[in-house]
Amino acid sequence: MANHRVERLAGELQKEIAMILDREIKDPRLGMVSVVAVDIAPDGCSARIYISPLANDADKKGVAAALESAKGYIRKELGKRLKTRIVPELYFQVDESIAYGVRMIKMVDAQIAADAKAAEGRPPLDEGTYKE
């Protein structure tokens, strides 16, 4: 497949899978998830879908098991919705990049607050000290 076609198909898969997971899959193990990215093989026969759970306490194994059990249904629905001859085989992978980013932001905010609190007791910086 041409590169632009693969990218366009990946975008469509991402949109449709997100809609299916949000509106049609009722598995309680899944919870709220986000479809982060879709990588499609150049021949279009397989696709790796990166899913990120939005809840902090989400069980990765439970999310992976829910996605694995719903894989056939999702692929069948994609076959109905997409105008392609071949519906790619789906491989789900739990991606924690969103949760990692949130943790890093909290750590940076905590460090900034700690630095501001430590700076309250210091005398003001004399600007002339470091000039030659």
Image (cartoon, rainbow, N blue to C red):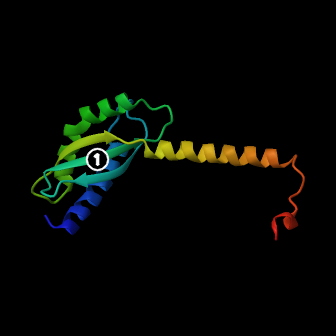
Residue highlighted by disc 1: 49
**Secondary structure of residue under mark 1:** strand
Outermost right residue: 123
Horizontal side of 121 relative to 84 (left or right) equals right
Horizontal side of 14 relative to 33 (left or right) equals left
Eyeballing the image, is 99 above or below 5?
above
Residue at 29 percent of width and 49 percent of height: 17
The 10 Å Cα crowd at callout 1, few under 14, some 14 to 19, many 20 or more, is many
Residue 51 lies, in percent from the top left, at 36, 44
Outermost bottom residue: 132
Q: Quadrant of the C terminus?
A: bottom right
Viewer-proximal residue among 96 and 30 = 96
The quadrant holding residue 107 is top right
Residue at 78 percent of width and 49 percent of height: 116
Outermost left residue: 85
The quadrant holding residue 131 is bottom right
Kind of residue sitting beneath label 1: Ile
Viewer-proximal residue among 110 and 18 = 110
Residue 56 lies, in percent from the top left, at 51, 35
Residue at 42 percent of width and 35 percent of height: 31
Residue at 82 percent of width and 49 percent of height: 119
Q: Quadrant of the N terminus?
A: bottom left
Horizontal side of 111 relative to 81 (left or right) equals right
Viewer-proximal residue among 81 and 89 = 89
Horizontal side of 103 relative to 94 (left or right) equals right
Viewer-proximal residue among 76 and 2 = 2
Residue 106 lies, in percent from the top left, at 61, 44
Tally of numbered discs: 1
Eyeballing the image, is 65 above or below 113?
above
Residue 110 lies, in percent from the top left, at 68, 43
